[in-house]
Amino acid sequence: MLRGIRNVTSNRLGKSIMSVLFGILIVSFAVWGIADIFKGSTQTTLATVGSTDIPLEQFRQSYTDKLQQISRQIRRPLTPNQGRAFGIDRQLLQQTIAETALDEEARRMGLRMSDAEIVHTISTDPTFAGPNGKFDPQRFAVAMRDYGYTEQRYLTEQRRLTLRRELIGSITAGAEPSNTQIEALSRFQNEQRTIDYAKLGPDQAGTIEAPSQDALKTYFEAHKAQFRAPEYRKVIYLTLSPDALAKKIVVSDEDARKIYDSRRTDYMKPDRREVLQIAFQSEDAAKAARAKIAGGMSFEDLAKEMKLTSGDIDLGLVSEKSLGDPIIAKAAFALPLNEVSQPVKGSLATVLIKVTKVEPGSTEAFEKVAPAIKKEIAERRVRDDFDKMRNAVEDERSGGASIAEAAQKSGLEATTVDVDRSGRTPDGKEATLPKGVDLITAAFGSDVGVDNDPLNFPGGEVWFDVLGITPSRDRTLDEVKDQITTGWHNDQVVTRLRAKAKEMVEKINKGGSFATEVKAAGLTAQTSTPFKREDKVNGLPDLVVDTAFRTAKGSAAMAENVPASSGVVVLRVADITTPAVDLNSDASKKMKEGLAQNLSDEQIGQYITHLETTLGVKVNEAAFATATGATGNQ
């Protein structure tokens, strides 16, 4: 499974899924494996834990729900095949068996939970709280819809979950790390080391003469597997998507102009004005204030006299329509710039108005908005045509047409590519592949002559056929002579650098001076700043840090770059510092919480393993394959 995880995380889709997967699939307890008894059962029963059967259809639904849940998180569909590649099927199986074992034990112990208790638990869950902090039925209903639950199913699941937590809580109560454990871990994590070091680069390997033909043959035979040609699949595929169809649709200026004319008001930017306003409780008060302005007081000073801030009087840059009160709006947009109005009696108050800025309106030209209008028209036509086009392709395929024939008759374009499992063509370039689907996995899981189901992605589909298979083979020396020559040369560099570094390390560890040996080798000695186990050091490879923490103070060692042909580092541990441990610090408290969780997980894991062993676990592998969709892919 680890190889599968490495494979699927080699692309952006895989990384996105794994980042979500490890957040979703971790149960509230650790599961340290399931009983290794995989025996048959009835075809409708996927597994049996003690006296409890896990129905095949129940697990199938759980697996489908899990894939849909992850799909929503990563915002792209996750197929059953991809789910198996990520190990989701086995993780869910382990989780289901562990949960069933806990449910069985809870029943044996007579644990119960009343309806009132479960209702209280859900109604006080902050997940479903509205803006007022209280239970919001609407938010609860939306959550149930998003996660594919009925209310009754959720209540049942929560009842089981709560009982499991009660049972687990009784096992983990009091699990707390000792001060000795915290101190030991703190010293381990916070220990700092300082090293003296020198870098040996390829130049220190000296001149390496060109290899003889016999040397190349010997190297080639010893490393033949590294240069083996991978298996290639010749795949033809046809992609149907709204974007692809939209590119084929030509929208005339005339059609776009009709939309523009019918929505002309949408492209008009109205006049806007920056308006200041002071409201008064009565018309007489407004008149008295206007008299002060007529006497020389400024609008702004009047506001200050009334203890109003700029925020109280500034309505901002507004259009006539957005002002709300039509009477005040009309007066504001009739008022000359920087003049103060006479009292204006609005629907709610009498006001004085001042306009400090005028921004004339405008209308966006057709030429500017035409591309957006044409795109909108094209997308609308695509929505109308997409289903017709999809059905046309399916009809052609059902009638025995090849991908190429179906594409030609549908007016679409098929693409043929030779590709290996890494997505590269025989010349080493990245193959042109459809986005949003894992065509490579599907193609390498199929064969020549197999009628494949289309692959789905948001908004579209991909049909494909495997036209041919070029088996993996050993390449000849002549085919890879350049690579062989480079590999042989790099090996010579590594051998010389290792020998030189080893000699320096031995001399230093026998009492020689680090500075003297480095100088004698024509290198430059450097000293690092103090660093911890997880730190990066002056651009040095991670292996240097690891080596430094495995080397005693005053001793020397060597660490290679990756690849080793790019250089070797000789180092000496100059100093080791172990900070004092403050058990009352925030860092120690956080460390204590982490250790407590680890101890709790370990106890839970051991407890569940005990339950599974005691109760007995049987898994019907055939039913498991059926539930996860593996049967049809074997």
Image: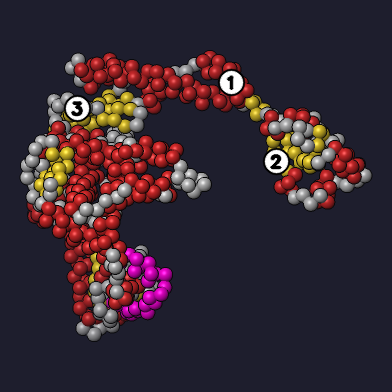
The front one of 576 and 329 is 329
For disc 1, the marked residue is: 263
Q: Quadrant of the C terminus?
A: top left
Name which residue type carries label 1.
Arg
> Do we see residue 614 in this rendering?
yes
Q: Quadrant of residue 146?
A: top left
> Is residue 205 depicted above or below 420 in this figure?
below
Given contact means CB atoms under 8 Å apart, are the residues at marks 1 and 3 in contact? no
Dot 3 crowding, Cα within 10 Å, few <14, some 14–19, many 20+:
some
For disc 2, the marked residue is: 316
Q: CA distance from mark 3 to mark 2?
A: 62 Å
Dot 2 crowding, Cα within 10 Å, few <14, some 14–19, many 20+:
some
> Do we see residue 548 in this rendering?
no
Residue 378 lies in the magenta-colored region: no
Q: CA distance from mark 1 to mark 2?
A: 27 Å
Label annotation for residue 452: 3
Q: Residue furthest bottom?
A: 511
Name which residue type carries label 2.
Gly
Label annotation for residue 527: none
